Image: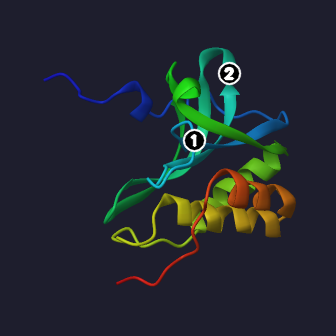
Amino acid sequence: MASSRHFSDMNFSSAYPDNNSTKELFLQAGGRKASDVPRHVLLFWWNNQSSNMREIVQLKGISGRYTYDHRVQMSSPTSEMNNERWSLGMATRAARNRIIEIAAAVPFNPRSTVNDCRVWMRLLLEAMVQEHIITQEKFDEIDRVQIPLPRPAPEV
């Protein structure tokens, strides 16, 4: 039986590992503009831009079925056209490793129907500010101007 996995679901970390260079961090939001519809968000950096390989950190899933996801993913050719991206600044390899550690420790309820990937991303970015990986000004710009990142709400 043929696999139904799409190339964007595969993990290419063994073929395209991170290296020691300083890299630009990006926040990506689904769609081309803010709207009333919640937008999926993820954090990434390029491991091999010429091959469209990026290392991603995200909370993925649907309401009531979320999972933490960290992998090297092939970016689809339409990703840049269909989504918005903002630079969060530059990060060393040590900072990127710390981001992965922080992201894995961000608390989330996999069965939440209230708090989604945007809430999780808020918590991750706030922790990155506390660790001086990104600036408070950059966080505020993203939060207020670009992508609304809701605060955690009580579960119902």
Quarter placement of the N terminus = top left
> Which element type, helix, strand or loop, lies under badge 2?
helix
Q: Label for residue 135? A: none
Quarter placement of the C terminus = bottom left
Query: Visible in this render: residue 77?
Result: yes
Between 65 and 83, which is closer to the camera in this rendering? 83
Mark before the other along the chain sequence, 2 or 1: 1
Name of the residue lying farthest toward the top = 50
Task: State whether residue 129 is above or below residue 94.
Answer: below
- Lateral position of residue 79 relative to residue 49, left or right: left
- Lateral position of residue 8 relative to residue 15, left or right: left
Mark 2–mark 1 distance (CA, rounded to whole Å): 24 Å
Task: State whether residue 36 is above or below residue 114.
Answer: above
How far from the left and from the top, in percent, is residue 117? 49, 59
How far from the left and from the top, in percent, is residue 96? 74, 48
- Tell me which residue sits at (55%, 66%) in the image: 119
- Lateral position of residue 22 relative to residue 147, left or right: right
Q: Marks 2 and 1: which is nearer the front?
A: 1
Name of the residue lying farthest toward the front = 36
Q: Amino acid at mark 2?
A: Gln
- Tell me which residue sits at (66%, 38%) in the image: 85
For the rendered model, the colour scheme is rainbow
How far from the left and from the top, in percent, is residue 15? 56, 24
Tell me the residue that label 1 is attached to: 33
Q: Amino acid at mark 1?
A: Lys
Tell me the residue that label 2 is attached to: 49
Local packing at callout 2 (Cα closer than 10 Å; few below 14, some 14-19, many 20+) is few
- Tell me which residue sits at (80%, 52%) in the image: 95
